[in-house]
Image (cartoon, rainbow, N blue to C red):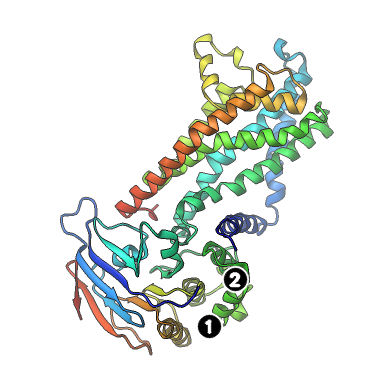
Amino acid sequence: MTALRAHGAAAAALVERDLRVFLSYRLRPFSLLFAPFMTVTLFYYISRLVKIQALGSSDGYFAYVVVGIVALDVLTSTVGVAPLTLRQELVAGTFEPLVLSPFGAVRSVTAIMAFPVLQAFVVSGATLVFAALVFGMPVAWPDVLLGVPAAVLGALSFAPFGVLTMACILVVKQALAGASILIATMSIFAGVYFPVRLLPDWIEWLSEVQPLTPALDLLRHLITGAPSADPALLDAAKLVGWTAVLLPASFATLIAAIGYSRRRGTITEY
Amino acid sequence: MAAETVSLSLLGVSKRWPGSDQPVLDDVNLVLEPGAVVRIGGANGAGKTTLLRIAAGLIRPEAGRVRLGALDVETDRTAFQRRVGFLSASSSGLYARLTVRDHLRLWSRLALMSRSDRAAACERVLAALGLRQLADRRVDRLSMGQRQRARLAGAFLHDPRVVMLDEPTTSLDEEGAGLLAAEVERVRRAGGGALWCAPGEIETSLSFDQRLVLREGRLLAA
């Protein structure tokens, strides 16, 4: 067995572990879908009250916000849920075996991110199907299929923020509030619920310095056929750029955080 | 993993907790020879757990080195961890909603064991620690002693050269302590070694090759 296969099996084992724990709560799959379905329903009726010139119609706004909800779910899975999982590992004392395993702390922390992201993809897919079937949200066929690699690219560009949050958790133990603030700030300035052009001119620049904006633009174009602010390839290039710049930096920070907390002797404290 | 006889050495290990004037470990030297089982005693807070955590590579000392044969705990980390089994002094480290078998499958993959070895290794430790009947029971439905057996199974699962056990008999009944002793003997017979930390005298059939005590940061003959 090659080292690569062994490491892949170890990463898959952590995903399987999270899946088994998830499925051990029998109603969890239903409760997981309930919240986004209710949110979509709520926004459908809000959209009946709203007419934004830039989005054309109530249906245009509904499609706009549904894709926003889906992208926000993927962002939350990387920046919020994965660090929460790490925090729970510390509290339960289950992080220690991961640190002391040949698979190691860095790879384990990385693998911990996989299940929340996969779960977000499944929920996002179900949310889009729900919105399309129940409320007639337009779906751009067959471009919508390209939404899957675009979502993967988006998740990769969000991942550095999750890795940085987990690095903070290993050092200061409490960083989830910061993650929540980051998610809320990114969602406001990227245009999850409303176009960024509604923001004051002096603050619109914030939408340009984060990966959620091009991810939303790209996903809306591919999933619903909405006109995009930038060409799709430019949005994809921006996401690749964010990933290429931030991912190595975030892993360097994570490695430093693990080293620091091992030197202090606090790596398994909570 | 092919059997190999190597020494675990801690050379000049010192550790001081932030904000503390006194070092918890002060220039500690220890060589665990192949086939040796060493007991480390000491009062509560003497530094036994810290010593074991440093030896296992969980935390880093301010000074000193930890080596297993030619492997350095920092620079050869993956190879080092493949050869070391560790049991911490607590009842934690288990996932309440997973079964004993789920844990062993997870740990065997984290140990980077080959697919062909994993199933056999899981079955072996289940039998060795008397867990066969409990293999498919969720951990939150086990007694504390049964959980300790499951934790021990994780420490011995990947056929380590050296096992580091911190208060391993916690919650174990007589049968469990006997099975633990047999597992340590198995490691010893294979040319491996064991570090066994406990604050007071323990009831075990195991014979120790050396008895040491940690006192004021120094490792002394008991």
Mark 2: secondary structure: helix
Cα distance in 3D space between marks 1 and 2: 15 Å
Residue B119 position within the rendered picture, expressed as x and y whole percent measured from the top left? 62, 73
Check disc 1 and give the amino acid type. Answer: Ala
The reply to the same-chain question for discs 1 and 2 is yes
Relative to B50, say whether A168 is above or below.
above
Residue tagged 1: B128
Secondary structure type for disc 1? helix
Residue placed most toward the observer, A77 or B86: B86
Residue A68 position, x and y percent, is 66, 28
Chain under callout 1: B
Instruction: Determine whether, in the image, residue B121 is placed left or right of residue B185.
Output: right
- Residue at 28% across / 79% down in the picture? B200
Q: What subunit carries mark 2?
A: B
Q: Give me the residue at 57% from left, 58% from top.
A: A10
Q: Is residue A70 left or right of residue B212?
A: right
- Quadrant in the picture for the N terminus of chain A: bottom right
Badge 2: few (under 14), some or many (20 or more) residues near its Cα, within 10 Å? many
Q: Disc 2 designates what residue? A: B118
Q: How many marks?
A: 2
Answer left or right for A48 relative to B109.
right
Identity, as a three-letter code, of the amino acid under mark 2: Arg
Residue at (60%, 13%) from the top-left corner?
A198
Q: Look at the picture and state if B46 lies above or below B190.
A: above
Report whether A134 appears left or right of B8: right
